[in-house]
Image (cartoon, grey):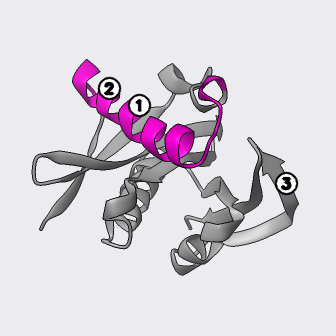
């Protein structure tokens, strides 16, 4: 099966984004709904991973300063993990960030998925912290 990633542009696309995030974060990981949707939704670029005609994953890109992008809300449906969809989402996000002038990408990884991000070239820094009841670690990757 072929997976492609596109920017989420239409209302229908955004409905898919929020549906996937609700399934992964709210239903599967018990993140409170009021923490999952935040004030950055409209200021971010959202992406959807599609397998054939089905949306299977999402992430969003937000700039925290002119040269630093942040990868956020990376989520792939449970049954579609380990298919390469997460890697493709991150590569697309990185390419768009680079085109917009980012020199590095920052993200807050759930501790259990640090190995996934390390394979993509991200390095952890700082100390673990709690976000919505889940241990996280700051990670970054230079785009130079």
Label 2 and label 3: CA atoms lie apart by 30 Å
Asked whether 108 or 79 is in front, the reply is 79
At horizontal 33% and vertical 62% (from top left) the residue drawn is 79
**Coordinates of residue 142 in the picture (x, y in percent):** 62, 66
At horizontal 23% and vertical 24% (from top left) the residue drawn is 12
Q: Would you say residue 55 is visible in this rendering?
A: yes
Mark 2 and mark 1 residues within 8 Å of each other at the beta carbon: yes
| Magenta region includes residue 133 | no
**Coordinates of residue 139 in the picture (x, y in percent):** 70, 63
Q: Toward which corner of the image does residue 104 lie, by quadrant?
A: bottom right
Main secondary-structure element of the magenta-colored stretch: helix
Q: Earlier in the sequence, mark 1 or mark 3?
A: 1
Q: Toward which corner of the image does residue 10 lie, by quadrant?
A: top left
At horizontal 54% and vertical 43% (from top left) the residue drawn is 25
Mark 2 — residue?
Answer: 15
Magenta region: 9-34
45 up-or-down from 58: above or below = above
Q: In screen coordinates, is 86 left or right of 53?
A: right
Residue 129 — which label?
Answer: 3
Mark 1 — residue?
Answer: 18
| Mark 1, other Cα within 10 Å: few <14 / some 14–19 / many ≥20 | some
Q: In screen coordinates, is 37 left or right of 47?
A: right
């Amino acid at each position: 099966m072929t997976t492609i990633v596109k920017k989420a542009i239409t209302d229908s696309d955004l409905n898919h984004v929020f549906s996937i995030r609700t399934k992964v974060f709210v239903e599967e990981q018990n993140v409170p709904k009021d923490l999952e949707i935040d004030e950055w939704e409209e200021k971010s670029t959202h992406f959807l991973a599609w397998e054939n005609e089905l949306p299977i994953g999402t992430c969003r890109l937000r700039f925290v300063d002119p040269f630093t992008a942040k990868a956020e809300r990376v989520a792939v449906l449970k049954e579609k993990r380990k298919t390469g969809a997460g890697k493709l989402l991150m590569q697309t996000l990185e390419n768009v960030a680079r085109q917009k002038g980012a020199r590095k990408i920052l993200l807050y990884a759930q501790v259990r998925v640090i190995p996934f991000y390390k394979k993509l070239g991200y390095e952890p820094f700082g100390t673990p912290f709690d976000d919505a009841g889940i241990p996280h670690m700051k990670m970054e990757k230079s785009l130079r």
